[in-house]
């Protein structure tokens, strides 16, 4: 069965049939990974360039598939924020194609010499980057993740098994068909990127037990998904936890920067994981800075929830609860808290945050450096919007997600992070005494 036939595959399978289907996907992925590990950098680049061209050619089919997904989502009463994550238009399809081209233009991450040295006995040792193998990726409703994940896995020489959100079922199939076109045109196996052909939740459980076929699982979604994967997986996990991101306005913040950064960090696109969910403001400048910042947010339709001091400054702000400080809204809602300087900001972030992305606005270099050093998050920024938490913005072409775990990889997971390494040792007849 080729990827092009997947849109016509059943979305409901019996348990034995689903297990057999998943096993077949795993076998094909393992075979494709072996071929990709030996593929030249030029072949992988050509496949990605061809996939980008196929996305453009298939744009009408991709948009038609997305319209089916949106119609089903609307019937189910999906929220406006989640609908925005799901929706494609001509501009977003073109952005997907450009993203694949950006990945194609990256240096080949496989085959890099990471370190090299010689031992006194004459052994020459190198540590060399190699593909991970087969990557299983479980993600939410954003269809662009299908192209990003498949493209990044391919660039690093990996095969990918994708289990997209049920809301983006048709969109993801259309995008995988374009990726398969690109692979085959470059002489690489079209099965290097496969989509699980069912919406059955049982497919996730089967993936987590496919340790003979899958080398790494990357879950990208809400807390319940991450916790389930970490609890059940027999395969190593690269965890992308929720983005409870903060922006802290310091006493030494430039007022104009504070307004512009806060508005962008929250409202540029509320449904992405890098959107600020909590605003923290130094008590020393709260009376001066908050009114304008809150007015800007309210004018853009943002619901504001604040602590007692915030509501004393702006009585129209709703009362925040303890749960608000722990919530990833993914919507036009912001919690606001007045804190005791950088001490209070760091304490709040390290207690309530998800170790994703946090920013400080300040002109005080010493305070900025302290924030960077003491905030325990994958990404920390000074005088910049948290919405820069994106592999594309980091020059990585794209990302599979933002890893919030402490073990590597941490932060944006791009093609380079989808490699491991091996040691290559060259001798001239040495034997160990």
Image (tube, helix red, strand yellow):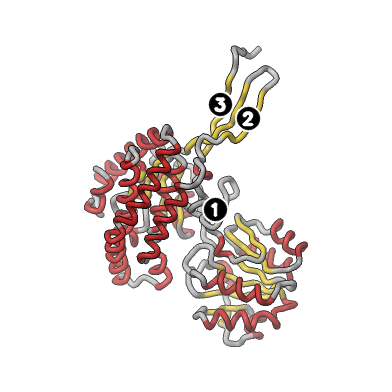
Work out whether residue 75 or residue 188 is closer to the camera in this orientation and state it. Answer: 188
- Determine which residue is flagged by label 1: 395
Q: Residue furthest right?
A: 366
Residue 13 picture location, percent across and down: 24, 50
- Determine which residue is flagged by label 3: 424
Nearest to the eye among marks 1 and 3: give it: 1
- Residue found at x 62% / y 68%: 247
How far separated are the C-alphas under marks 3 and 2? Answer: 9 Å
Give the crowd class for mark 1: few <14, some 14-19, many >=20 residues within 10 Å. few
- Determine which residue is flagged by label 2: 116
Q: Is residue 177 left or right of residue 317?
A: left
How far separated are the C-alphas under marks 1 and 2? Answer: 26 Å
Number of on-image labels: 3
The quadrant holding residue 287 is: bottom right
Give the crowd class for mark 2: few <14, some 14-19, many >=20 residues within 10 Å. few
Residue 138 picture location, percent across and down: 41, 52
């Amino acid at each position: 069965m080729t990827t092009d036939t997947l849109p016509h595959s059943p979305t409901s399978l019996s348990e034995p049939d689903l297990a057999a289907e998943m096993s077949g996907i795993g076998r094909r992925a393992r075979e494709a990974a072996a071929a990709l590990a030996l593929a030249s950098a030029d072949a992988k680049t050509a496949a990605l360039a061809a996939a980008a061209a196929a996305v453009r050619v298939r744009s009408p089919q991709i948009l038609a598939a997305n319209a089916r997904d949106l119609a089903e989502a609307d019937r189910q009463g999906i929220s406006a924020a989640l609908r925005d994550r799901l929706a494609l238009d001509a501009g977003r399809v073109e952005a997907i194609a450009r993203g694949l081209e950006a990945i194609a233009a990256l240096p080949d991450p496989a085959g890099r010499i990471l370190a090299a040295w010689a031992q006194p006995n004459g052994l020459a040792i190198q540590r060399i980057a190699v593909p991970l193998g087969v990557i299983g990726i479980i993600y939410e409703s954003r269809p662009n993740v299908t192209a990003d994940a498949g493209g990044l896995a391919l660039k690093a020489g990996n095969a990918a098994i994708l289990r997209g959100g049920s809301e983006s079922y048709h969109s993801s199939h259309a995008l995988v068909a374009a990726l398969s076109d690109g692979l085959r045109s470059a002489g690489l196996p079209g099965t290097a990127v496969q989509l699980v052909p069912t919406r059955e939740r049982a497919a996730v459980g089967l993936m987590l037990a496919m340790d003979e076929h899958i080398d790494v699982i990357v879950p990208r979604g809400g807390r319940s998904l991450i916790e389930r994967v970490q609890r059940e997986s027999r395969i190593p996990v690269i965890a992308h936890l929720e983005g409870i991101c903060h922006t802290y306005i310091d006493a030494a913040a430039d007022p104009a920067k504070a307004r512009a950064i806060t508005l962008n960090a929250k409202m540029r696109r509320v449904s992405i994981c890098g959107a600020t969910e909590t605003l923290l403001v130094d008590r020393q400048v709260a009376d001066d800075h908050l009114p304008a910042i809150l007015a800007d947010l309210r004018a853009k339709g943002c619901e504001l929830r604040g602590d007692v001091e915030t509501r004393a400054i702006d009585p129209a702000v709703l009362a925040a609860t303890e749960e608000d400080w722990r919530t990833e809204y993914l919507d036009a809602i912001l919690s606001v808290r007045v804190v005791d300087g950088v001490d209070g900001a760091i304490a709040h972030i390290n207690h309530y945050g998800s170790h994703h992305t946090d920013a400080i606005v300040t002109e005080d270099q010493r305070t900025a450096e302290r924030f960077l050093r003491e905030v325990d998050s994958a990404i920390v920024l000074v005088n910049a919007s948290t919405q820069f938490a994106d592999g594309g913005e980091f020059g990585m072409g794209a990302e599979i997600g933002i890893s919030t775990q402490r073990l590597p990889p941490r932060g944006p997971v791009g093609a380079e992070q989808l490699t491991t390494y091996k040691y290559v040792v060259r001798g001239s007849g040495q034997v160990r005494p």
